Image: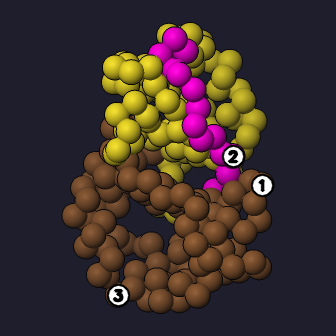
Chain colours: A brown, B yellow
Amino acid sequence: MYGLIGKIQVVPGQRDALIAILLDGAREMPGCLSYVVAQDSTDPDAIWVTEVWDRQESHAASLTLPSVQQAMARGKPLIAGFSERCETVPVGGHGLATVP
Amino acid sequence: MYGLIGKIQVVPGQRDALIAILLDGAREMPGCLSYVVAQDSTDPDAIWVTEVWDRQESHAASLTLPSVQQAMARGKPLIAGFSERCETVPVGGHGLATVP
């Protein structure tokens, strides 16, 4: 499996707008086993996105999907930066979807 | 929902042993919607645990489960420290289990 953990700093006041765009863009991504968007509990201008994919190639392919490209175009102006971005190798757990 | 994102620094050489303990202890936790254990891609002595719960009280209650307490007792000597620990408010996504 292939994982990404990212903390996004959002343009102030745009957190909920960015979250809506991310969730809208993340529907029906082949090979995506988990994609969770979360508010940071202490920083009102930060969100976390945690992703699990069956393999890295599925994540790379998702970036070419029209729905994802549209979300990236809409979301980019709302992103101030990335304060954390880490690649992982998920090894197991609970709540991983079956491959669509 | 209630979320936790943690990066654990492991005693060198004990990463896979700690992962096995964590996965074993994380079975059948009421209210747990997602629990993923991942190796860090660059640090061989670091793992990430990302959790999503229906509410914070379910996470607190899980810490009293015998299976979780046993896992904590077994895992503690293998943990060198926590380099990241963040509470989140997950708002949606894909791959969240239904409440058991």
CA separation in Å, label 1 and label 2: 8 Å
Q: Is B12 drawn above or below residue A33 in the view shown?
A: above
Q: Nearer the viewer, residue B48 or B99?
A: B48
Q: Are marks 1 and 2 in contact (CB under 8 Å)?
A: yes
To which residue does mark 1 refer? Answer: A42
Q: Are marks 3 and 1 in contact (CB under 8 Å)?
A: no
Tell me where the magenta segment starts and ends, as one range.
Answer: B75-92
Q: Please, what is the three-letter code of the amino acid marked with disc 1?
A: Thr
Q: Chain of mark 2?
A: B
At numbered mark 3, what does the secondary structure look like: helix, strand or loop? helix
Q: Chain of mark 1?
A: A
Q: Nearer the viewer, residue A91 or B44?
A: B44
Residue A24 painted magenta = no
Q: Please, what is the three-letter code of the amino acid marked with disc 2?
A: Glu
How many other residues sit within 10 Å of disc 2, few (<14), some (14-19) or many (≥20)? some
At numbered mark 2, what does the secondary structure look like: helix, strand or loop? strand
Q: Which mark is residue B87?
A: 2
Image check: A80 left or right of A22? right
How many other residues sit within 10 Å of disc 3, few (<14), some (14-19) or many (≥20)? few
Q: Please, what is the three-letter code of the amino acid marked with disc 3?
A: Pro
Q: Is A85 drawn above or below residue A25 in the view shown?
A: above
To which residue does mark 3 refer? Answer: A66
Q: Are marks 3 and 2 on the same chain?
A: no
Q: Nearer the viewer, residue B64 or A51?
A: A51
In the rendered image, residue A22, in percent from the top left (x then y), is placed at: 53, 75
Image check: B81 left or right of A31? right
At numbered mark 1, what does the secondary structure look like: helix, strand or loop? loop
In the rendered image, residue B47, in percent from the top left (x then y), is placed at: 44, 35
